[in-house]
Image (spheres, rainbow, N blue to C red):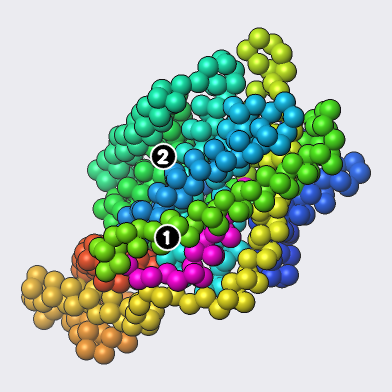
Amino acid sequence: MHNTILIILGLLFIVMLLVLLAKKLKIAYPIFLVIAGLGISFIPGIPRMGIDPDVIFLIFLPPLLYEAAWYTSWKDFWKWKRPISLLAFGLVFFTSVVVAYASSALIPGFTLAMGFLLGGIISPPDAVAAATVMKGLGVPKRAMTILEGESLVNDASSLIVFRFALAAILTGTFSMNVAVGQFFITAVMGLITGLAIVHIFYAIHRFLPTTPAMDAALTVMTPYVIFLVAEHFHFSGVIGVVAAGLFMSYRSHEVFQTGDTQLNMMGVWTTLAFVMNALVFVLIGLELPEIIHGLGDASIAQGIKYGLIISGITIGLRLLWVYPATFLPILLFRSIRETEVNPGWKGPLVVGLAGMRGVVSLATALSIPVLMTDGTEFPHRNLIIFITFVVIFVTLVVQGLTLPLIIKLIKIKDREITKPREEQHAGIRLHLHKAALQHLESRHAREIKSNELIRHYRDELFNDVTKTKQKLDAFECNDIHRSQITQYTHIMQESIKIQRQELFKLRKQAIYSDAEIRRMEMQLNLEDVKLSGHEH
């Protein structure tokens, strides 16, 4: 037990150092961690690190999906639902079908059902890798939103394809009509399960006297409960967790109304997501010796050959799919031409090249049972796992290293007309301070006259409304009566609450970007925390 804990702590420490080194070398840390894990795995004396698929699916996947959904703008997700759906569902099924027929023709003894199994495994890209690689490269917001939205849903569709193919291999029977019906039942019931359970947590957060620590703990529990319940009834736990994350993100202003709670949760989730993502990427590299050891009769050279061919097919299919999926709706429907800006050829190219596979694909491959129902070995299991690793390595490392160069070479620009950050910031601040000033003057006119601190706060709000530049001055409390301090703090907190409500209205009106609204919400949180500190 002590040795296991020591190994885990040592691995965490090494991961942190590797991430720092990746930052120093200006390489996206998912790519660097996979390469580093691969190098570490061949050091003599290093213990073999096997990835338990249950660990990935039950421990890593729910919180990572929930965190990704939490930081996804529902407004943007819904706006680009068509391209997201075409990638998350259409491309997954298209890739699965083509890979199924190609692999069954390429690999001796590989049946069509095994091909669908492989297609389901390697079809979903990894969003964390793509987002990390493209960070700071000026990729248009539309492309990033589509990639993030795709990653939230494609795990569900690929896992459903995988399960149907696995069932067909184990039972020897397959019905397309039954499979299609089961797919929709699995997806819809996963959605209903997620929304039903998250409403329970929503009620706990909103109506019970929770503390910031309890709120953070409950948010960590939420994706696990939803995933386990949905999977217990053979529904899609992935869709359930994603739906719950989007719902709670949209309703966060109602349940997490204090700065302490929001800042505490942000710290917890930022740390948790970073550690989990970093660990799973280094584990991919560390897993290779175990995969090679289990390769069996197939030679490494054959496995690499098959893996490279399948990798080329998956990359080509994505590029082949992206352009028709982008431009055919524009050509066919006038309403789309009138409401959407033509993305040009550069945006789809970036989306097409950003299909980097990750840990979900490897965990799915490792979850293939060792034995069939009759006790015989599962055919080609080790070869499927090895091909999956090659596809991950090629798409993650090779594409990940070349994509930034391509983005810089084509000099991509955002075709969407958006206001500059400074303008959005000033506009949001003007709305918030107008709302707070109106509330103060209509509800607390008497306190403005009797309490110098409140009158000073009103003057500051007035100056901010007229100039949109000044910040609230830090107030001195040494010589102020305790009752006035309490009254001042209470009214300031009321004002911040009103501004949060105004932020929610602005989010619904879609005048400003969600990113700028979140930044302003963070400022309100900091002001709220500062008030709480003075209160105690």
Which image quadrant for residue 121?
A: top right
Residue at 55% across, 39% down: 96
Residue 497 lies in the magenta stretch: no
Which of discs 2 and 1 lies nearer the camera? The answer is 1
Q: Quadrant of residue 97?
A: top right
Judge whether 485 appears above or below 456 on screen.
above
Write the residue at 73% across / 48% down. 308
- Residue type highlighted by circle 1: Thr
Q: Can residue 91 be seen in this view?
A: yes
Q: Is mark 2 on a helix, strand or loop?
A: helix
Bin the neighbour count of mark 2 within 10 Å (Cα to Cα): few under 14, some 14-19, many 20 and up.
Answer: many
Q: Nearer the viewer, residue 228 or 258?
A: 228
Q: What residue type is labelled 2?
A: Ile
- Is 485 in front, or is 64? 64
Spot occupied by residue 360 in the image (x, y as percentages of width and height): 59, 42
Q: Name the residue under label 2.
A: 239
Q: Is residue 301 above or below residue 445?
A: above
Q: What is the residue that sits farthest to the top in this orientation? A: 374
- Which residue is situated farthest in the bottom direction here? 467
Q: Quadrant of the N terminus?
A: top right
Q: Residue at x 28, y 79 (%)?
A: 427
Give the mark nearest the N terminus, 2 or 1.
Answer: 2
- Check residue 350 for magenta coloring: yes
Q: What element carries label 1?
A: helix
Give me the C-alpha separation between circle 2 and circle 1. 24 Å
Residue that carries the numbered disc 1 in the rendered image? 326
Q: Magenta segment range?
A: 340-358
Spot occupied by residue 173 in the image (x, y as percentages of width and height)? 53, 17
> Which is nearer the eye, 321 or 277?
321
In the rendered image, residue 451, in percent from the top left (x then y), is placed at 17, 78
